[in-house]
Image (spheres, rainbow, N blue to C red):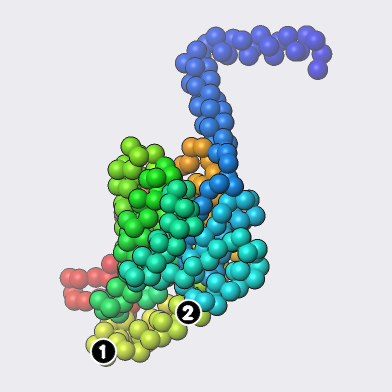
Amino acid sequence: MEPREEEDLFERFKEFLGVNPALLGTLTSITLIIVCWTIKDSLRIKDIREKHVFITGCDSGFGNLLAQRLHKRGFTVIAACLTEKGSQELKACTSPSLRTVLLNVTNPKSIDNAVQYVAEETSNKGLYGLVNNAGRATPIGPTDWLDMEDFHRVLDVNLIGLIEVTLKFLPLLKKARGRVVNVASVMGRLAFGGGGYCLSKSGVESFSDSLRRDMQYFGVKVSIIEPGFFKTGVTSLDIIEKDLNRLWSRLPPDVKGSYGEKYFENYLKVQRLSMNTFCDTDISKVTNCMEHALTARYPRTRYGAGWDAKFFWLPLSYAPAAVADVMLKIILPRPLAGKRVLSKNQVDV
Ligand SMILES: NC(=O)c1ccc[n+]([C@@H]2O[C@H](COP(=O)([O-])OP(=O)(O)OC[C@H]3O[C@@H](n4cnc5c(N)ncnc54)[C@H](OP(=O)(O)O)[C@@H]3O)[C@@H](O)[C@H]2O)c1
């Protein structure tokens, strides 16, 4: 660029800023906020080696990967597995310093044993991190296909189990001024698919919010992870379809008739298509968020994990209900009864 042109450009820029002091102020403020937030977000804690982290549901998926990664980083990891097989497999791919313990979060005695084990392991100094990750998705399906037992099976693990584990570990967490990381879901922000799953995750959101507000005075920090869809045990099509078959086959004829035989086929097709489209295989996107919540000096309150969560499900959860309803109506199949003209004056909606 010629010197003359450069001068012109500079003059025009000065003029522009001179004419728009408000714009200049706004841009400077936004830049400053972004820079300060980025610096704050990148600060990390020290002395990882002296810190104990207890993770539930480590047999597979996010919990399993997180246990391995925190172990590699130097944390003292106590990985809770539901099964002996899960525990043996995790031990086989790590070193003896990673501890495992058997834990069924729906069994109070099992939780008590785990708390006692952690108290001994930490020499009663306190627990730095509790990651409530254990969870299940099935039974999940249209609401009138389900009974109370189906709701309990999910709520007991994902919500009641999580609350009981947290309450029983709180004294140790308060001692260490530690952290709680609760795994919720985008389905806790936008409910679709009947059953206990969305309810449980929505409950995890509100339990975590009250816990964070109550525990701030004791130095205990609480973060919520909101993953989108990832390929793991909870999104396994085999498990979901097997359970949907069970639900469909036990339906009384009148309920089945109101949906129509084609509905079930279409439901499975949509399920397969959406799982194959949305499910991300890179589960480290979720464990990165969990790691940040445990290692950042200032952990975030909420972590949206995955592109679908950040750019589709979470924005949609802020949209007016009518918009979300229409979007979901486009995606999900429609029962036979919903397609009929019910009477002369009632038309399909
Ligand atoms: N994958 C996703 O797309 C997604 C999205 C949002 C949120 N999440 C949440 O992320 C968490 C981890 O799930 P994941 O995706 O990693 O699936 P996963 O591989 O199935 O992990 C769930 C773990 O929880 C264990 N578990 C089940 N019932 C339990 C119980 N009663 N007590 C203790 N542990 C129990 C499972 O053990 P078994 O394997 O032996 O059954 C498994 O190890 C869950 O809370 C899930 O709801 C997942």
Q: In the image, which disc is placed on residue 239?
A: 2
Between 205 and 179, the one lying in front of the other is: 179
Mark 1 or mark 2: whose residue is earlier in sequence? 2
Dot 1 corresponds to which residue? 252
Between 10 and 271, the one lying in front of the other is: 271
Report if the beta carbon of the residue with label 1 is closer than 8 angstroms to ligand 1. Answer: no
Q: Is residue 194 visible?
A: no
Amino acid type of the residue tagged 2 in the rendering: Ile
Between 54 and 114, the one lying in front of the other is: 114
Q: Nearer the viewer, mark 1 or mark 2?
A: 2
Q: Is residue 172 above or below residue 235?
A: above
Q: In the image, which disc is placed on residue 191?
A: none
Label 1, label 2: how many angstroms apart (C-alpha)? 23 Å
Report if the beta carbon of the residue with label 2 is closer than 8 angstroms to ligand 1. Answer: no
**Residue displayed at 58% across by 51% down:** 75
Describe residue 337's horizontal placement relative to residue 49 as left or right: left
Indicate the secondary structure of the residue bearing disc 1.
loop
Describe residue 22's horizontal placement relative to residue 85 as left or right: left
Few, some or many residues within 10 Å of mark 1 (<14, 14–19, 20+): few
Q: Quadrant of residue 219?
A: top left
Q: Is residue 273 above or below residue 302?
A: below
Few, some or many residues within 10 Å of mark 2 (<14, 14–19, 20+): some
**Residue displayed at 31% across by 53% down:** 207
- Horizontal and vertical percent for residue 306? 54, 54
- Horizontal and vertical percent for residue 117? 44, 62
**Residue displayed at 68% across by 11% down:** 10
Image quadrant holding the N terminus, namely top right
- Horizontal and vertical percent for residue 124? 43, 51
Amino acid type of the residue tagged 1 in the rendering: Pro
Q: Is residue 132 above or below residue 348?
A: above
**Residue displayed at 48% across by 41% down:** 299
Q: Quadrant of residue 38?
A: top right
